[in-house]
């Protein structure tokens, strides 16, 4: 009976996040379509130049990133299935990890499929609504990921610093509430900024020197720039990145202090092993975000910006299954059981 309840709550978390995505998608599509028809913009589509190189290089990029995308979906999907079906992983720590892997699937899907299609396309165009929808889902899913990393840090802090109170605080119900809040606030954070950005006048040119629709290239194409919209976006981005990063660093500072007080070397190693994977993901993800959104990018060549963006949109979700499966005995055992269909 307890196992059925765990699976039910786990399924509710996934269904709730999927419902959020579908609802927001339909509402934003309608809003953006109305904005595009109501303003004086003459641009109905954008041209994404994508990654540099000729046709041979484009085929190479297509093959490379298709392989990375397939591995990302397969690896994170395996983690989701392992957490879903292995009873030993029906704990808040692994339920959070399973939902995080589910998030990574959506996050990489918001950019990579369009990039793959773009690399083989001759026109390399994307519709006005499609561009802003990609921008919205890309930023919203990235924001949701920062929130998830926060509650995963909170979970590890409770487990190590307050082990006796952990079962009473981090219940499955509370865990599902936290995950739901991450999805809701993640998708609400940039909804207003996206609509405001779509209201700007775009009268040409319509060429974006990037492989996705992002804030800087879209603002550069506007015929009537809005400093307020840009300032609000970067203030919001800065607050989200700084506050979530400070919270994670603060949690792990307290956690490390508690770990160093453990008299047993084996106990310290076990504590470090459970937190090392999460810290690795935090460093990779936030490192690239800080370079891209917290430092001046006007003097950074477009090619370098593309590489930085590739790092936190493609490479980090690709490494996620490797980081969590190679450093976690329980996860490795569950994946082996899943692959052997035992």
Image (cartoon, helix red, strand yellow):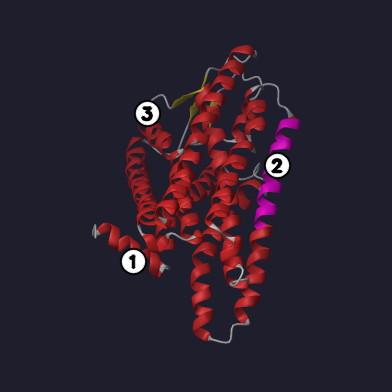
* Magenta stretch bounds: 228-245
Distance in Å between CA atoms under marks 1 and 3: 42 Å
Residue at image mark 3: 121
User: Can you name the residue that lies furthest to the front here?
Assistant: 1
**Residue 229 sits inside the magenta stretch:** yes
Residue at image mark 1: 333
Picture coordinates of residue 319 (x, y %)?
43, 56
Label 1 Cα crowd, 10 Å radius (few <14 / some 14-19 / many 20+): some
* Whether residue 213 is visible: no
Q: Is residue 88 left or right of residue 237?
A: left
**Mark 1 or mark 3, which has the lower sequence index?**
3
**Mark 1 or mark 2, which has the lower sequence index?**
2
* Whether residue 225 is visible: yes
- Between circles 1 and 2, the one closer to the viewer is 1
Q: Is residue 324 left or right of residue 264?
A: left
- Residue occupying the point 64% across, 60% down: 248
Q: Quadrant of residue 168?
A: bottom right
- Between circles 1 and 3, the one closer to the viewer is 1
Picture coordinates of residue 42 (x, y %)?
59, 14
Q: Quadrant of residue 166?
A: bottom right
**Residue 236 — which label?**
2
- Residue 189, placed above or below residue 67: above
Our reading of the magenta stretch's main secondary structure is helix
**Mark 2 or mark 3, which has the lower sequence index?**
3
Q: Quadrant of the N terminus?
A: bottom left
């Amino acid at each position: 009976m307890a196992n059925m309840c765990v699976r039910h709550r786990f399924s509710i978390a996934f269904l709730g996040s999927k419902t959020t995505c579908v609802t927001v998608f339909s509402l934003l599509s309608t809003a953006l379509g109305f904005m595009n028809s109501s303003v004086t913009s003459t641009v109905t589509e954008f041209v994404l130049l994508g990654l540099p190189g000729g046709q041979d290089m484009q085929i190479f990029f297509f093959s490379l990133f298709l392989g990375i995308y397939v591995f990302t979906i397969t690896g994170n999907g395996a983690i989701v299935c392992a957490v879903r079906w292995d009873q030993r992983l029906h704990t808040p720590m692994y339920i959070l990890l399973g939902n995080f892997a589910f998030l990574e699937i959506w996050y990489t899907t918001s950019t990579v499929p369009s990039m793959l299609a773009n690399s083989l396309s001759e026109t390399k165009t994307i519709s006005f609504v499609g561009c802003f929808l990609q921008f919205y889902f890309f930023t919203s899913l990235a924001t949701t990921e920062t929130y998830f990393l926060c509650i995963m840090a909170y979970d590890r802090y409770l487990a190590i610093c307050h082990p006796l109170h952990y079962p009473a605080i981090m219940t499955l119900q509370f865990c599902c509430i936290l995950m739901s809040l991450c999805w809701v606030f993640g998708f609400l954070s940039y909804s207003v900024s996206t609509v405001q950005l779509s209201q700007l006048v775009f009268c040409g040119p319509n060429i974006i020197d990037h492989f996705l629709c992002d804030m800087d290239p879209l603002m550069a194409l506007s015929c009537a720039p809005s400093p307020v919209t840009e300032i609000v976006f970067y203030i919001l981005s800065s607050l989200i990145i700084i506050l979530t990063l400070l919270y994670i660093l603060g949690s792990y500072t307290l956690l490390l202090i508690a770990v160093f007080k453990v008299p047993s070397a084996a106990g310290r190693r076990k504590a470090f092993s459970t937190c090392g994977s999460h810290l690795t993901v935090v460093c990779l993800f936030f490192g690239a975000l800080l370079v891209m959104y917290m430092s001046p990018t006007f003097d950074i060549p477009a090619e370098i910006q593309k590489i930085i963006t590739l790092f936190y949109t493609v490479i980090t979700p690709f490494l996620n299954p490797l980081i969590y499966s190679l450093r976690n005995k329980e996860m490795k055992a569950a994946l082996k059981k899943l692959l052997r269909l035992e």
